[in-house]
Image: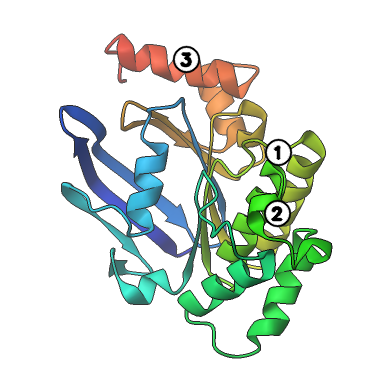
Amino acid sequence: MVACLVEVRGAVKNFGSFAALRGLNLDIEEGETYGLLGPNGSGKTTLIRAMAGVLRLDGGEIRIFGKKVPSREVAARVGYMTQAPALYEDLTVRENITFFARLYGLREKVAERVEEVMELVYLADKADRPVRTLSGGMKQRTNLACALVHRPRLVLLDEPTVGVDPRLRQGLWEYFHRLNREGTTLLISTHVMDEAERCGRIAFLQEGTVLAVGTPAELKEAAGAATIEEAFLYFDRRRGGGDDG
């Protein structure tokens, strides 16, 4: 039986009068690549920030590795890649990654691990360049390296391919699948339909709630749809029409 790594129960988050999460429930199994698919404002980033422990819920709870979030113990085993690069512009690529390695509690062979992740994201030749001199795609890769440097068991990736070129996007997804094969659990938010097809399971999100969960094939079959986009629209219409089954 596959263990449930992440449990979200009744998650509620409000920003003033705006309800970002409305009693949302979700389970992510250990070792899977799980996608959150929905338009801007559907709750994807809010949910990921709550999982990362940087945003407190107004109601409900999140448990990761069986422990309630936020937790220092959980944080040390989770990698979080923000949608916009959270980097120190005046530090070099190497210095940024080293800083995050130590922040996450990595103490042994830090320099060796930093070199490893720079190679993985094709930035070894940019190691000593200040981040402010990098292109948007290079900053995104540096951001990813910072999230992976401590070998987390769970990686939270918020729109990781925004602003990167198609070739790099393909390379990043190949690396995500490699991580997954090595046993790392991935949660990836996106609003790009073809990226959702690359996930083992997907949750369709709209207005802070889950419309449907399943594999891409299951969701398309349930909706009688040829594409993920058509399936999303089917479940969205069904919710809007009040036909919840």
- Badge 2 marks a residue whose secondary structure is helix
Q: Quadrant of the C terminus?
A: top left
Residue under pointer 2: 177
Q: Nearer the viewer, residue 37 or 168?
A: 168
Q: Is residue 210 left or right of residue 117?
A: left
- Badge 1 marks a residue whose secondary structure is loop
Q: Which label's residue is closer to the chain start, 1 or 3?
A: 1
Cα–Cα span, label 2 and label 3: 28 Å
Residue under pointer 1: 164
Q: Position of residue 28 (x, y in %)?
A: 44, 53
Q: Nearer the viewer, residue 206 or 85?
A: 85
Residue under pointer 3: 234
Q: What's under tag 1, amino acid-wise?
A: Val
Q: Position of residue 74 (x, y in %)?
A: 38, 71
- Is label 2 or label 3 in front? 2
Which quadrant holds residue 159? top right
Which quadrant holds residue 68? bottom left
Q: Is residue 184 visible?
A: no
Q: What's under tag 3, amino acid-wise?
A: Tyr
**Residue at the location (61% across, 43% down)?**
199
Mark 3 and mark 2 in contact (Cβ < 8 Å)? no
**Residue at the location (32% across, 69% down)?**
66
